Amino acid sequence: MHGGYNVIFDLFEKEKVLNDTHLIIQGMNRLKGEVEIDGSKNSVLPLIAATSLTKDIMTLKNVPNILDTSVMCEMLTEAGGSYNLTNNTLTLANNIKNPWFSQELASKVRASILFLGPILAAYGEISIPLPGGDKIGYRPIDIHLDALEEMGAEIVVTEGVVHAKAKSFPLKGAPIFLKFPSVGATQNIMMAATLARGETCITNAAKEPEIVDLAQMLNKMGAKVYGAGTNTIRIVGVSSLNGTIHDVIPDRLETGTLLIASAITGGKVILKNTVPEHNTPIMAILRKIGVQIEVTDQGSIAVFGGNIKRSFKASALPYPGLPTDLQPLLTALAIHCPGVSEIQDNIYSERFSHVAEMMKMGASIHRYGNVIQVTGGQQLKGSTVSGGDIRTVTSLICTSLMAEGQSKIFGLEHLYRGHGGLVEKLNGLGADILFSTTSYSIMETTGDVK
Ligand code: EPU
């Protein structure tokens, strides 16, 4: 089992190297071939948090080798656990002794707040700094805190740290109405409710596939969670949970990214290890603008680009709507569609930092609040651009794939928070992407996280 200061040091070292590295992309290559999709970042992070609900060994398979996975594992180590990540299989042994966490790690990812529910439920108290994560606008945690208070937690936030204690232990089940179907709050409540006394019913719950994946793993651990994937989730508390082995679902956002990259370049690509129905909204948009998409029973999606005929209108919404995380990628797509496309983000109204960078390449985009209008069809020119969050960086990579000449993309420390091998996958499909420094090899880990 691994963990501890050496790994944390390696983590910061990796980030530093990535910060000093950039991508050099030569545009205009068509993508062609087959590619495997990794396990989902947004699923594995809550699953790691959920492992703190049991003292038994937990095994997660199809785990993406990304920085955010390392941060979540290191947080558990900080609290007294240990882990090993080899060949995308993560084994965790959690015997939490100190349910408090450092600012250093918690502030790196938004998902750190997902330890709040399970650790409070399993240990009765927790101190955890406010979460960090992508800079994509205001991201409060009021829905998480209000719900846990209704379940019997006493919560104080002082100097950026959330201190929560169960007034009586275990927590008590409660009816919870969410004013917005927050993904993270639904996950935190579900996890807390598994070990609470009595029944919890979440109304207006989030319905994302990552919620269903978490419920399935919790149920394998002995929890009683009903209705995940609908807007009402009922959880009947149990006294303890056991260890289990669980496969992380494929990453629908990496799938969406590669679908868009293939369409933009007029490529012919088969994406394997996907759950096609998780990508219904993006496939519908692509089909509408003239891209041919074929889905097989075995979870593959074939995309045939090269025939983009028209512009589109799209609106990012909670699942089963179009994911906000693909909104910057759709902007890249819109640049290649003849006519004026309109894209709205109803989840993060400020998630538009990609726009200014794309305009440096010659894109014509106007923003009106949470709506952008993109006049597509012009040839872009390579430029030097930078992204400050995962999806901005991936959207800039996609934009550069069809720009004339060379682009330089900065912000790799964000890219690697969410994608372990996207550059290699694109190069395997025929893209021309180089790393600016040789120290990139530090990221070539296939075994342990460290
Ligand atoms: N919100 C509140 N109060 C809360 C919680 C959320 O007002 O207590 C608001 C947020 O400000 C936002 C909206 O509700 O406007 C949605 O937030 P949600 O809680 O659903 O998002 P999250 O759980 O923090 C996850 C993903 C994000 C993804 C969103 C929306 C993880 C680790 N993160 O965040 O993923 O954008 O759901 O689908 O699962 C990414 O992968 O790039 C990413 C940012």
Image (spheres, helix red, strand yellow):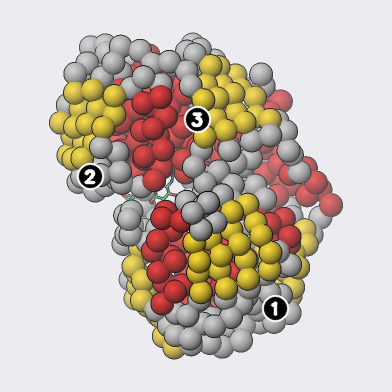
Q: Earlier in the sequence, mark 1 or mark 2?
A: 1
Is residue 263 in view?
Answer: yes
| Number of residues whose C-alpha sits closer than 10 Å to that of mark 1, classed few (under 14), some (14–19) or many (20 or more) | some
Q: Using the image, tell me which numbered label, if any, was put on residue 246.
A: 3
Camera-side residue of 27 and 71: 27
Q: Earlier in the sequence, mark 3 or mark 2?
A: 2
The percent coordinates of residue 416 (x first, y second) are: 63, 48
The percent coordinates of residue 81 (x first, y second) are: 55, 17
- Up the image or down, 79 lies above or below 310; here it is above
> Who's the residue at 40% across and 69% down the image?
284
As drawn, which residue projects farthest toward the right? Answer: 438
Q: Earlier in the sequence, mark 3 or mark 1?
A: 1
Q: CA distance from mark 1 to mark 2?
A: 44 Å
> Who's the residue at 67% across and 37% down the image?
12
Q: Using the image, tell me which numbered label, if any, was put on residue 28.
A: 1
Residue that badge 2 annotates: 231
> At label 2, which amino acid type do we have?
Asn
Q: Is mark 3 within 8 Å of ligand 1?
A: no
The reply to whether dot 3 and dot 1 touch (C-beta < 8 Å) is: no
> At label 3, which amino acid type do we have?
His
As drawn, which residue projects farthest toward the front? Answer: 297
